[in-house]
Amino acid sequence: MTILVTAASGALGHLVIDALLARGVAPSEIVAGARTPAKADDIAERGVTIVPLDYDDAASVEAAFVGVDRVLLISGSEVGKRAAQHQAVIDAAVRAGVKQIAYTSLANVERSSLVLAPEHLATERAIAESGLPATILRNDWYAENYAANLDQAAATGVLLSATRGGRVSAAARADYAEAAAVALIGDAHIGEVYELAGDPLTYDEIAAAMGRALGRDVEHRDVSAADLRAALESAGLDAGTIDFLTGLDEGIAAGDLDLEDPTLAALIGRPTTPLVEVLRAARGSEPAS
């Protein structure tokens, strides 16, 4: 059995490789596809084969599948290009006759209003139409995304949102990576669609976790969408980023990232990582006394 992990030089891909090795998969049975192979040198040092794999380079995608039995398609980062990029990987997987394709999709993707959802749903449908044996991993939000708010929270004691009490079932990137590794080992998960999530938290609870990670009080202020947009504009963010962030909060308010589902914990065989632990790790800090 040979497993290809795409986007292996990224944060999630690295962690999937770690999880596969930790669960006993031999380095000789793993192929790491990377747009820039030099960024995967640390993986190569562990005995894993590194191959060039650029979603926009059909020849590199085709070559990466030589001798591959299973593939984890990690979704690309270029919104607007991903459906076509993913289709290239799916087509190569079909030609290679892989025994399984697993894909990192998005929580609640069939009803989600998030701007990220349409390309994920299109990819899921393309995989279904391909006839490949598949496992769909619908990841909720990454808890590490909240690390971007820590400096502001440390300086101001405030977490601003327009989420109107909506909840987010974020989990650590390592938790999702471990679930992906589990799904790729053996045949038990073929044909499954998994909604993967941590414990749902309101932004009041997220602010409290930030406070524990920082060792200071952090207050959540739930404001109107217009006030949030004004605050982001004042912070100097570009229009595209502002649209994404305000749309994200709107989706959270609508419940797009609210899941109560034990599947992730069941797959990895342990509770998901608490948000405060993720934030402390991102901050490089010890638990506050």
Image (cartoon, grey):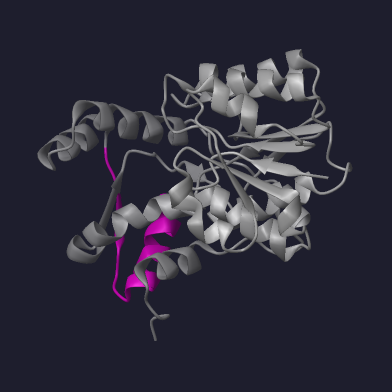
State yes or no: residue 212 in magenta. yes
Above or below: residue 272 compared with residue 168: below
Q: Residue at x 80, y 23 (%)?
A: 132
254 and 112: which is toward the camera: 112
Image quadrant in which you'd find residue 225: top left
Q: Residue at x 13, y 43 (%)?
A: 235
Q: Position of residue 200 (x, y in %)?
A: 56, 50
Left or right of residue 102: residue 7: left
Magenta region: 202-223
Left or right of residue 70: residue 172: left
Q: Which quarter of the figure is the N terminus placed in?
A: top right
State yes or no: residue 231 in magenta. no
Q: Which quarter of the figure is the C terminus placed in?
A: bottom left
Image quadrant in which you'd find residue 94: top right
Q: Position of residue 77 (x, y in %)?
A: 44, 33
Q: Residue furthest bottom?
A: 289
Q: Residue at x 41, y 28 (%)?
A: 78
Left or right of residue 29: residue 159: left
50 and 226: which is toward the camera: 50
Q: Position of residue 255 (x, y in %)?
A: 52, 34
Above or below: residue 235 compared with residue 127: below
Q: How many marks?
A: 0
